[in-house]
Image: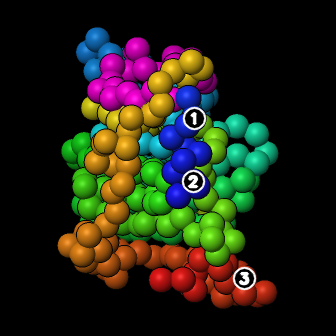
Amino acid sequence: MALRFLLLVCSMVAIASAGNFHQDFDITWGEGHAKFLNNGQLLTLSLDKASGAGFQSKDEYLFGKIDMQIKLVSGNSAGTVTAYYLSSEGLAHDEIDFEFLGNLSGDPYTLHTNVFAQGKGNREMQFKVWFDPTKHFHTYSILWNPRHIIFMVDGTPIRDFKNLESRGVAFPKNQPMRIYSSLWNADDWATRGGLVKTDWTKAPFVATYRNFNADACVPASGGSRCSSAKSGWWNQELDSASHARMRWVQENYMIYNYCNDVKRFPQGLPPECSIA
């Protein structure tokens, strides 16, 4: 396969990073609102009226399986967004998104996903989570290989974006991406379309991260060919049991699918929407 040959001759090294946040990430904004704790085993982001905060990985990745455990903002989190995503740089960037849209106390979070390829997104799928993501840590995973981008929550797949380049659908495959996360105020749109505003009397809002793991390929000049073909994620796809679990989530908890939004695409739905 031409794509596989191209990837294998790229100069990359495979890594498995079971993370120390202090070693693996840099704080990018929100001085004083991001903290490394427990010798780098925990990282917290906080949001108040003055600022939110964000961090990014020191390494870039070109394919891999990325896991992060997150405990989201508790209580009345309306208006807040916790974003966790992979992204390259530039106008024609690639991006793979998890975003968690806060809500009023007692209402479920909205989990928002999106995929950008060559600067084009508009591939949103949203879910109401089936658990309280603020009481305990939950694992949010991105599996990205040459054929699939699979979003998972605690090992359960919720979305599978397939490589359909042969049908004219762009797929992220050439641009290395960093891991980013941020906590910020988006009360102009995040909760009920902006109708519910952030209650700053509940600040600071805090999200906590632990157990980062990257089994991934890192571009490196002069490095060996990526040996990730030997790792499970390189060829991984959903088996029948995993498909059934994903269907269960989508049938019971999906609240928006761009492939069903005919009003948004009056000239016709994106081509991947008609391909099983």
Q: Residue at x 43, y 66 (%)?
A: 160
Spatial CA distance of label 1 from label 2 is: 11 Å
Q: Nearer the viewer, residue 40 or 269?
A: 269
Q: Amino acid at mark 2?
A: Leu
Which label number is shown at residue 265? 3
Q: Residue at x 28, y 48 (%)?
A: 232
Closer to us: 225 or 19: 225
Is residue 245 positioned above or below 86 on the image? Answer: below
* Among the 4 quarters of the image, the one containing residue 43: top left
Q: Mark 3: which secondary structure?
A: loop
Q: Earlier in the sequence, mark 1 or mark 3?
A: 1
- Give coordinates of residue 8: x percent, y percent: 51, 40
Q: Position of residue 194 (x, y in %)?
A: 62, 62
Residue 110's x, y, as percent?
44, 62
In the figure, 269 relative to 206: above or below?
below
Identity, as a three-letter code, of the amino acid under mark 3: Phe
Q: Residue at x 34, y 63 (%)?
A: 237
Q: CA distance from mark 1 to mark 3?
A: 37 Å
Check residue 109 for magenta coloring: no
Q: Who comes first in sequence, dot 1 or dot 2?
A: 2
Q: Which residues are magenta?
A: 12-33
In the structure shown, which secondary structural element does the residue marked by tag 1 occupy?
A: loop
C-alpha span from label 2 to label 3: 31 Å
Residue under pointer 1: 10
- What amino acid type is highlighted by mark number 1? Cys
Residue 3 tag number: 2
The furthest residue to the top: 39
Residue 144: tell me if it is visible: yes
Rate crowding at label 1 as few (under 14), some (14 to 19) or many (20 or more) other CA atoms within 10 Å: some
Contact flag, marks 1 and 3 (Cβ < 8 Å): no
2 vs 3, front mark:
2
